[in-house]
Amino acid sequence: MIDIQIENADEVICDCSGTTKAKIASLVEKGVYTLDGISRATGANSGCGSCDYEIENLLDELAGIGDQ
Ligand code: FES
């Protein structure tokens, strides 16, 4: 299991669903690496859609951590 440490883990990245960075990190740890998968699991990016770029960036960041 990847032990992901991220800054500002409690930061809400999708206001519409209240999804935090920590929630996304925990899903990545479980093997959910795509925006679509995150969206289905949390409801993120299924409201206004303005958070897609931020979620993609976070996924890229977390993927980089997982590669180390
Ligand atoms: S902020 Fe994520 S869908 Fe609106």
Image: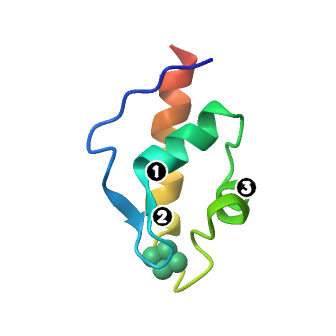
Q: Mark 2 and mark 1 in contact (Cβ < 8 Å)? A: yes
Q: Quadrant of residue 37?
A: bottom right
Residue at 73% x, 64% y: name it: 40
Look at mark 3 in the image and give the residue it sits on. Answer: 37
Residue at 43% x, 44% y: name it: 22
| First in residue order: circle 3 vs circle 2 | 3
**Residue 54 position (above or below residue 29):** below
Label 2 crowd (10 A; few <14 / some 14-19 / many >=20): few
**Residue 2 position (above or below residue 28):** above
Res. 50 visible in picture: no
Label 1 crowd (10 A; few <14 / some 14-19 / many >=20): few
How far apart marks 1 and 2 lie (CA) works out to: 6 Å
**Residue 62 position (above or below residue 35):** above
Look at mark 2 in the image and give the residue it sits on. Answer: 53
The local secondary structure at tag 1 comes to: helix
Residue 25's mark?
A: none
Hey, what amino acid is under mark 1? Asn
**Quadrant occupied by the N terminus:** top right
Q: Mark 2 and mark 3 in contact (Cβ < 8 Å)? A: no
Name of the residue lying farthest toward the top = 68
Q: Quadrant of residue 47?
A: bottom right
| First in residue order: circle 1 vs circle 3 | 3
Q: Nearer the viewer, mark 3 or mark 2?
A: 3
The image position of residue 58, as x and y in percent, is 46, 47
The image position of residue 62, as x and y in percent, is 50, 35
Hey, what amino acid is under mark 2? Tyr
Look at mark 1 in the image and give the residue it sits on. Answer: 57
Q: Nearer the viewer, mark 1 or mark 3?
A: 3
